[in-house]
Amino acid sequence: MAEMRKAEISESKKCPKCGQKERQVRNGSNRSGTQRIVCRDCKISYTLEPKRNAYGEETKALALKIYYAGTSGRGVGKILGMSKANVYNWIKKTTK
């Protein structure tokens, strides 16, 4: 059964460093629970399918709209359930 897992992984992913499809072995999981893989040839460890923690453009636009309507950055964060630092970083990027 372990051989089936190795074959399953090697068909779907290849090593980002050496490009090898064989000899890719499971290596536990990261904090978010995503599968980690180690290449036995070059000894690099990488995430099989990394999760992206990013807000969509609609959310960014809504946050900026609420901010420019008069709400503080902290208030926007509370309304949308996100960190105020995200809001302030988006404001900095739009003013440049």
Image (cartoon, rainbow, N blue to C red):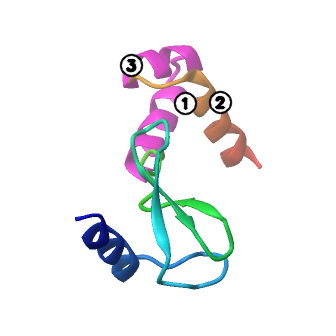
Give, as a three-letter code, the residue at label 1. Answer: Tyr
Which residue type carries mark 3? Ile
Residue 80 pos. (x, y %) = 39, 25
* Badge 2 vs badge 1, beta-carbon distance below 8 Å: no
- What element does badge 3 sit on? helix
Please tell me how crowded label 2 is: few (under 14), some (14-19), or many (20+) other residues with Cα within 10 Å. Answer: some
Q: Mark 3 points at which residue?
A: 79
Q: Name the residue under label 1.
A: 68
Which amino acid, by three-letter code, is at mark 2? Tyr
Q: Does the magenta stretch include residue 41?
A: no
Residue 95 quadrant: top right
Vertical arrangement, residue 45 with respect to residue 64, above or below: below
Looking at this view, name the residue that lies furthest to the right.
96
Q: Which residue is drawn at 39% across and 19% down?
A: 79
Q: What is the span of residues highlighted in magenta in the rendered image?
A: 57-80
Element at label 2:
helix
CA–CA distance between discs 1 and 3? 14 Å
Residue depth check, mark 1 versus mark 3: number of the one nearer the observer: 3
The 10 Å Cα crowd at callout 3, few under 14, some 14 to 19, many 20 or more, is few
The residue that label 2 is drawn on is 88
Looking at the picture, tell me which residue is in the foreground, 54 or 96: 54
